[in-house]
Image (spheres, helix red, strand yellow):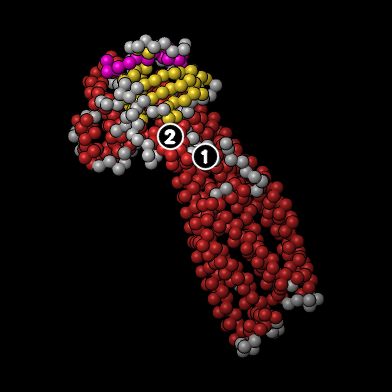
């Protein structure tokens, strides 16, 4: 289920993240209050100049509110001039202070909200089932977590620092001009419909342009990450030219999308300012005529012109904001697609957690497959499999490549859900188990153990982060990790690179076995754990595996004689079906 925006508004996408703003309501309300204070100071800024023009230069005392405020002052021109200069200085200081604190408060709220969004997107990505990850490249998902959340941050920060203050400022200036003189105020507002129509037109164009640009950037990021991840293969095969050609094609598509966005941005601001200039021209014409006929003073006209000039600042900012918001809305769509993906069935069933977690005894390790069928998209790889594996059994799955052995292991590991049928642990379907319960029951040693950047000890603790140092040392000794860790300068605390760079395949496999030992699960799954290892490394890994298998239910895929001899039963898999099980030679439906 993908998230769909209700309504055409750009802010509809950002409104999707409103729940993240609730903890920061006080900060946001305080920021709005500071913006109102800044507006009040800005509205007062032109009046000292009006006092100088009318009271000092034209010898006409101010009237209205300004006249009441200046009445206690001496009537001499020099005194009015000094007071006006001091007032201008004080007003500017207040305006700058409100602006500084308003920006700081509002923008910090935007930063905090985005940080929480990024945290949740990353957490959700880890919870999503493997089919979702199979459909998206690593680079494209990385682009969503990093780049798209940055674009959302830009949008949120601009909402708080530009949109909200801009709306407050425009409203305040419009009301102030109408209060100063309703006739001049109406003339000044004549440009509003033109400005609105221009902004609406280009908002639609820039939104579609931003979607296309983000889509092109995501595909480019996916290709880049894929090639960088497989750089060893690129060098080994000499395929740099092939990948350069693919990159050039996607880079050109990204360039065209970017140029379209640049063209729209370049056209938007001048047109908007031209529309706003209509109001300035109207004020100069009508206001100048009114001053000549004595309808209002020069100082009053200067105040209204200053208000109109100051209104153009938020208008220009809002024109640029529409570009930012369209980009942020396109990114918000991509991030929302992740946040609104359906999670694992177990994660969506709190009643199953409350029923099973507190009182469930430790699993015995009995595994049952009942009519299991599974496929990747339209390609079925497992067909109507029925299989019973008793506690403590060691079952090896045998068969040609592509027969479905690894897919069966993936189902037993809970990485995928069957399209039909059930995979059960001690009679309970995997769909009714929480992730935590399943991980306490089943551990996996893959064909190529992946190590994360960090220390060797941190990688060993991956399955049990709270394990004590003595437990880590125990499993390191049992899995023969200590044999090569002693050769490292810092032992188990030695830093290793991403993917285990610097360690051999056999050493990485021993780390994977140590992880399974530390998890201490009743079920262990082994997917070709000794494939590609030299005889010495294989011997060490098999020795570690023998220690891991003691007292556990084991299901493995292997062609290696050293591991085949450890099995108590063999199951032959062909074309996705289990066609033979020994030693009982139990025949299942072909």
Which x, y percent locates residue 338?
52, 39
469 or 367, which is in the foreground?
Answer: 367
Which of the two labelled residues, at mark 2 and mark 1, occupies the earlier sequence position? 1
Q: Which residues are magenta?
A: 565-579
Secondary structure mostly seen in magenta is strand
Q: How many marks?
A: 2
Q: Would residue 299 be seen by someone viewing this image from the given angle?
A: yes
**Residue where numbered disc 2 is placed:** 433
Helix or strand or loop: what does disc 2 sit on? loop
Which x, y percent locates residue 576?
46, 16
439 or 227, which is in the foreground?
Answer: 439
Residue 30 position (above or below residue 480): below
Residue at image point 49% right, 23% down: 421
Residue at the limit of the structure toward the right, as seen here: 293
Residue at image point 33% right, 34% down: 362
How dense is the environment of label 2, judged by Cα within 10 Å: few (below 14), some, or many (20 and up)? Answer: many
Query: In screen coordinates, is 242 left or right of 324?
Result: left
Q: Would residue 499 be seen by someone viewing this image from the given angle?
A: no
Residue 429 position (above or below residue 334): above
Q: Tell me where residue 5 sits by quadrant.
A: top right
**Residue where numbered disc 1 is placed:** 338
Residue 46 position (above or below residue 428): below
């Amino acid at each position: 289920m993908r998230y769909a925006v209700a309504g055409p508004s750009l802010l509809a996408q950002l409104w999707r993240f409103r729940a993240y703003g609730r903890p920061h309501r006080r900060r946001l309300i305080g920021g709005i209050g500071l913006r109102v204070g800044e507006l009040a100071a800005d509205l007062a800024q032109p009046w000292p100049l009006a006092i100088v023009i009318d009271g000092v230069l034209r010898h006409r005392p101010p009237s209205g509110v300004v006249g009441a405020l200046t009445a206690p002052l001496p009537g001499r021109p020099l005194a009015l001039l000094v007071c006006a200069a001091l007032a201008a200085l004080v007003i500017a200081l207040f305006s700058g202070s409100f602006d500084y604190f308003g920006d700081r408060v509002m923008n910090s709220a935007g930063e905090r909200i985005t940080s929480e969004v990024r945290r949740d997107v990353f957490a959700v990505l880890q919870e999503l089932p493997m089919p979702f990850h199979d459909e998206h490249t690593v680079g494209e998902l990385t682009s969503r977590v990093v780049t798209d959340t940055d674009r959302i941050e830009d949008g949120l920060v601009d909402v708080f620092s530009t949109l909200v203050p801009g709306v407050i400022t425009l409203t305040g200036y419009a009301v102030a001009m109408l209060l100063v003189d309703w006739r001049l105020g109406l003339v000044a507002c004549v440009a509003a419909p033109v400005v609105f129509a221009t902004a609406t037109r280009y908002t639609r164009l820039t939104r579609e342009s931003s979607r296309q640009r983000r889509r092109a950037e995501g595909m480019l990021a996916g290709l880049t990450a894929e090639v960088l991840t497989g750089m060893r293969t690129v060098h080994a095969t000499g395929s740099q030219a092939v990948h350069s050609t693919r990159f050039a094609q996607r880079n050109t598509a990204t360039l065209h999308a970017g140029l379209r966005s640049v063209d729209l941005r370049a056209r938007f601001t001048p047109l908007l300012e031209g529309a706003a200039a209509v109001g300035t021209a109207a004020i100069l014409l009508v206001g100048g005529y009114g001053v000549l006929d004595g309808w209002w003073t020069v100082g009053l006209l200067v105040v209204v012109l200053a208000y109109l000039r100051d209104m153009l600042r938020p208008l220009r900012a809002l024109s640029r904001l529409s570009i930012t918001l369209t980009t942020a809305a396109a990114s918000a769509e991509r991030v929302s697609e992740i946040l609104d993906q359906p999670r694992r069935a177990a994660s969506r069933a709190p009643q199953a957690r409350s029923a099973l977690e507190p009182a469930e005894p430790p699993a015995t390790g009995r595994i049952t497959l009942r009519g299991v069928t599974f496929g990747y998209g339209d390609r079925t790889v497992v067909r109507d499999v029925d299989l019973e594996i008793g506690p403590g059994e060691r079952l090896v799955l045998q068969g040609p490549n592509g027969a479905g052995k690894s897919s069966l292991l993936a189902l037993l590991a809970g990485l995928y859900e069957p399209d039909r049928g059930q995979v059960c642990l001690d009679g309970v379907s995997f769909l009714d188990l929480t992730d935590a319960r399943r991980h306490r029951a089943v551990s996996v040693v893959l064909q190529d153990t992946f190590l994360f950047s960090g220390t060797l000890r941190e990688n060993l603790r991956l399955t049990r982060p709270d394990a004590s140092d003595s437990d880590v040392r125990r499993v390191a000794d049992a899995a023969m990790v200590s044999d090569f860790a002693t050769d490292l300068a810092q032992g188990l605390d030695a830093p290793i690179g991403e993917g285990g760079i610097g360690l051999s395949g056999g050493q990485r496999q021993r780390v994977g076995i140590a992880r399974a030992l530390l998890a201490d699960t009743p079920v262990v799954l082994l997917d070709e754990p000794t494939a590609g290892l030299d005889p010495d490394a294989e011997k060490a890994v098999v020795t570690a595996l023998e220690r891991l298998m003691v007292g556990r239910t084991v299901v493995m895929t292997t062609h290696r004689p050293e591991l085949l001899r450890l099995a108590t039963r063999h199951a032959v898999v062909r074309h996705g079906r289990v066609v033979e099980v020994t030693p009982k030679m139990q025949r299942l439906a072909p």
